[in-house]
Each structure stands twice: as C-alpha cells, then as structure tokens.
Image (cartoon, helix red, strand yellow):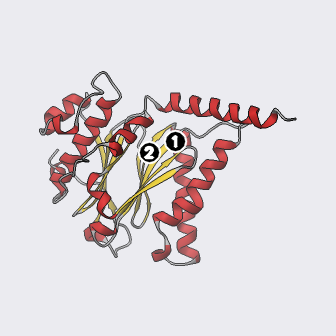
Amino acid sequence: MTEEPYRWLEAIQNRREYIEDQLTPGLPVVALSAEPGVLLLGVKTAMPKLFEIYDTLALGSLGHPADIEKVRQTAIDAAHLEGFARSAQDVSSRRLVSYNLAPALKAAFEQIFSAPLLFRGVLAELGATPADDALWSVDYDGSFTAQTGADLVHGTVISGPRQVAKDWIAQSPRPELDRNSLPAAALSALRLLVWAKLRGTKDQGIEFENTPKEPKTLKEKLGVEALEFALLDRSLVGKPIAYRIPSVDELGL
C-alpha cells in the first residue's frame, strides 16, 4: 500500500514525458496584442489551429486534432453558458481559463488510466484598448500563465517544444514588438513565428533581433508559403463578433 503514491507519481511522470514527445513536432502559434486588435498567426496546415470562441475571445492551439476539438468545444460551451446565465460582459478569458479549461485539462491529465489530451494553446481576449487585452497560455496539465498590461508588448508564443516559450519569456531584455499598425504587427508576429520554429531546430541559438525583416525571406525560413491568421478586430468591439480573417493585403504578408 505504501508504494501506491510513488507508483502514481511515476505514472504521471511517464505520462508527461509521453505528451511532451508527442507535442514536440507541433508548429508554433503566435499571439500579439496590437493597436488594431489581437492578431493570431501560425503555419497553415490541413487542420485549422485558430478558432473563434466567443464575442471577443479566440483560441490558438497545437496538438492532436481530436483533442484540440475537444478543448475548443469545451471553451465554446462554457463561454456560451456563462453568457446565457449571466451576460456577455461576464464572459472573460480569466473566468474561462480558471474555472473551466484549466480544471478540465488537469483532471484529464491526472486520470492515468485514460488517454491524455495532447493540447497546448493560447486564449486571447480583446479589450477596448490594448492595455485591456489578455493572452493566456494553457497547457495539457492545466497549468496556465497570463500576459496582461505592460507585458503584452512582448507577444506570446506556444510551441511543440515547451522550452521555446520559456526561452522567449526568459530573454533579458525582452524585445518589444512593433504593434502600431496591422502590417507592423503582422511582420512582428511573423518574425516571432520564425524565431520560435528555428529555436527548436539546428538554428536554436538564433536571436530575435537576427531574424529577417522581409516577409518573403521569413516565409522561406519557415519553409512554407501559406499562413493561418485571425484577428480580434478592435473596431468591432461592441458588435456581435470581433473575430475575423484579415486579407493578406491587409497584413502586408
């Protein structure tokens, strides 16, 4: 009987290692709070990774498509239930993460006799001004971190290798990304996306300042032509939906 807690801890550690191995090949997703709104950017694949959740909420994700869909649906159901039971103004990223997503992910992670959720994501909330925005990084084990206020100038990144996001946070001094216009924010987000992708490869020593500043060169570094992007448009605050897909011309990419 005395060995049971140790067996559980060992099982949890094995489970964590398995999930990290499965997530490592995942392509990064970047979220950036800017004057025009909150921009989410990722590499376009067969399965979408960016989703509308509620009026001013959007989700960027990586992991197994079925697990991403399960988390997405949980977020949508929780947000709409909150909006129906209270009001649309009561639906916030803080409540959604703290009371719904994090507990559900933690419970799934600790159920060692069931399949784990292969998921890592960023939940973005649009405010009336950039200072009111919020970016929440949420992981498969229910852990989460928030970026608000002055910290938003650095943008946030989620990546298959967990260390990449930690490296971005640990940089000192941390780069402040250009976010005064939509094209400037899109270029900054694309540079961060390239940095995050290269960080987990042979070019892992790359510094953000050394990433190219030309969209064509950045795409060549990524090795892709197509990008997936979404915008929580600040000009649409107060209207039913702030989520939209901007055109490539708008982004200057």
Q: Which sits in the foreground, 233 or 146?
A: 146
Residue at 17 percent of width and 39 percent of height: 209
Q: Is residue 74 above or below residue 42?
A: below
Give the percent coordinates (x, y) of residue 132.
Answer: 33, 69
Instruction: Find residue 85 and report its image quarter.
Output: bottom right
| Left or right side of 8 for 252 | left
Looking at the rendered image, the quarter that the C terminus falls into is top left
Give the percent coordinates (x, y) of residue 217.
Answer: 14, 32
| Left or right side of 109 for 182 | left
Q: In this orientation, does residue 157 appear? A: yes
Q: Secondary structure at mark 2?
A: strand
Point out which mark residue 239 bears: none
Point out which mark residue 61 bears: 2
Q: Which sits in the foreground, 114 or 151?
A: 151
Residue at 18 percent of width and 51 percent of height: 251
Q: Point out the tag, 2 or 1, that comes first from the N-terminus.
A: 2
Give the percent coordinates (x, y) of residue 151.
Answer: 31, 58
Label 1 near label 2: C-beta < 8 Å? yes
Point out which mark residue 119 bears: 1
Q: Amino acid at mark 2?
A: Ser
Give the percent coordinates (x, y) of residue 80.
Answer: 53, 67
Q: In this orientation, does residue 160 appear? A: no
Q: Is residue 191 above or below residue 223?
A: below
Q: Crowding near pointer 1: few (<14 within 10 Å), some, many (20+)?
A: many
